[in-house]
Image: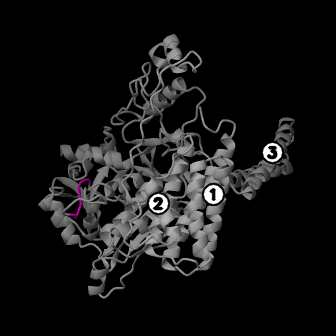
Amino acid sequence: MSDFAGMEDLLQDFLVEASDLLANVDNKLVELEQNPHDRGLLHDIFRGFHTIKGGAGFLNATELVTLCHLTENLFDKLRNGEMEVTPAIMDVILAATAAVREMFHHLEGGVQPPPADPGLIAQLKAALSGALTQEDKAPPTAAMQPPAQPAAPAPMPEASSPAQEPNWEALFAALHGAQGVSSSTAPQKAPHENAATPPMHTDVKGKPAEEIIQHALGRRAADKPGAMAAPLGRRADEKTRDNTIRVDTARLDQVLNLSGEIGLTKNRLSSLRSDIINGRIDTDTLHALDQTVSQLDLLVSDLQNAVMKTRMQPIGRLFQKYPRIARDLARSLGKDVELVLAGEETEIDKTMIEDLSDPIIHLIRNAVDHGVESPEERRVAGKPEKSVVRLEARQEGDHIVIIVADDGRGMNAEKLRAKALEKGLITDEEANTMDERQSLNLIFLPGFSTKEVASDVSGRGVGMDVVRTNIQKLNGSIDIRSTPGKGTSFIISLPLTLAILPVLLVQLGSQPFAVPLSMVREILPVRLEDVQEVGGRATMVVRGEVLPIYPIAHLLGWETERVPQYGVLMQTAEHSFILAIDGFLGREDAVIKSLEGFRPKGVAGVTTLSNGQIVLILDMKELLADLGERRGVPRLAFLPREKLAA
């Protein structure tokens, strides 16, 4: 049973508010380290911590109150000028805020937090008495340690007396068989595993689109009657994540007003419908109908945008934890690094904020560890001893751009190719044909690292490949720009929301398919005289660049006698290629529906067009991975059969 029975709502409110306050305190502490004489910062920090202590006291979280009280006393002495801010005191304070955050994790589980580390308490008391020296080391903070493994659940206590609460899980298991066994003792199953309906992961190749769509939709209807598919990018463990969201009341008022206007317009349409049924089809009635339908179209579009905005959150809520992480890591490495934030007011889909957390942490740790030099190296290079890592967000059209940039040593494309060759990640032929952009992208290969000796921070060749994979899951892309001796920038481009995906509708015969518009660069005519065979595969030269051609029919494994008429120049993080198609229908904003329990290989989801037709959204990365990145089709595949026979 929870230690906070009857106080669950109060506890959740406290955790939301206190977590934001603590993140703000951490950021101000990092800023205070740069400006130790700023009394305004100390006053803000003191007020934030005092508020946290007050909430903890109301919840009777005694150990949390004790830790907060000692730390608050230290802040009080600092703001009153009785003590000066020193590196040793800052280490102890930051260790205390890390311990407070750990106590929040216990509160999230509904249990009272245990006492703080006695060593930390002793350090705080020593600081208050003025006995803390520069040589004293505070316990390492959470940001400096590798992620801890989740603690195993405590075993259930054995029954010791008749008065003890019975084991309800065991009783349920006895009544209902093995299915009632607790998840902690039952064999683990895959998220989609079901004894009656085994999961299906079929191949799209060679199957008509209609069969795939009907099979998928029919299976979903049988498995989950009335259920709606989750938006693309939602994970199976969604229920374990924070599903709450803060929405400005002005936005909710806008949604309410638009709903009311749509209701009035619906009534007007009903009235016009009755008039038309009763024979009134004069010019005025038809004109009124046209105006009402146009008004409804505008209102629905406005309502859709307003609802989407309720999912948008300032990215500053994600950024606020990074200055502390960068500070702790830099201090552990003996570097002087300042993390500069920009564009914190930029709004992004709330679900994407959660999925971006780990990739940005990897990029910041990589910048601090690999990117920036030590103070000694920077002095020799004529740079300021303090290095700057910039984390910036901004909106560009229908995309959000996030930049992680440093002013460090930069990357050398030739050295990256040599390291990849040494590790056997690429061949000599591939190395010789790589341009600078492709060479920089080698750092995303699994197992690639420029570190000779692995450390607790980096060097094992994991991290950057995870970054790219996670960004691609969000239908985004990541690019690198680097200048040796001047620094490196990672540019992440993401759609505004996962619920709507801009797509290009292409045709194979009369069957339409959708491809992500973010990958499309341009549409080209494909003429047989322009198709050349290089290395056994069909290619075209576009502005001096030799690009492989992949007919969409070849990717899907469909038999066709048609010769593709058009090519879509597409670009992924790895390479560019031309997708040969029979025609195209234009651009559309697709509302994505995922295929639960049945996902054909190479299909990311389905969408419904304005005419009601259901269209498959192709996963180009999966189709290309199955084909093989360096393989293609011969030029003969583009010749009509009569020419082949001749």
Tag 3 residue: 263
Residue 606 point in image, percent of width and height = 49, 41
- How dense is the environment of label 3, judged by Cα within 10 Å: few (below 14), some, or many (20 and up)? few
Gap in angstroms between the C-alphas marked 2 and 1: 22 Å
Q: Does residue 564 belong to the magenta stretch?
A: no
For badge 2, the amino acid type reads Ala
Tag 2 residue: 122
Residues marked 3 and 1 touching at CB (< 8 Å): no
Residues marked 2 and 3 touching at CB (< 8 Å): no
What kind of element bears circle 3? helix
For badge 3, the amino acid type reads Gly
Q: Quadrant of residue 644?
A: top left
What kind of element bears circle 2? helix
Measured along the vertical axis of the image, is residue 590 above or below residue 71?
Answer: above
Taking the image as shown, residue 82 lies to the left or right of residue 331, namely: right
Gap in angstroms between the C-alphas marked 3 and 1: 45 Å
- How dense is the environment of label 1, judged by Cα within 10 Å: few (below 14), some, or many (20 and up)? many
Answer whether residue 394 is visible to the viewer in this image.
no
Gap in angstroms between the C-alphas marked 2 and 3: 66 Å
Segment colored magenta: 446-451
Residue placed at 27% from the left, 78% from the top? 484
Q: Nearer the viewer, residue 371 or 145?
A: 145
Q: Of circles 2 and 1, which is in front?
A: 2
Q: Nearer the viewer, residue 416 or 265?
A: 416
For badge 1, the amino acid type reads Ile
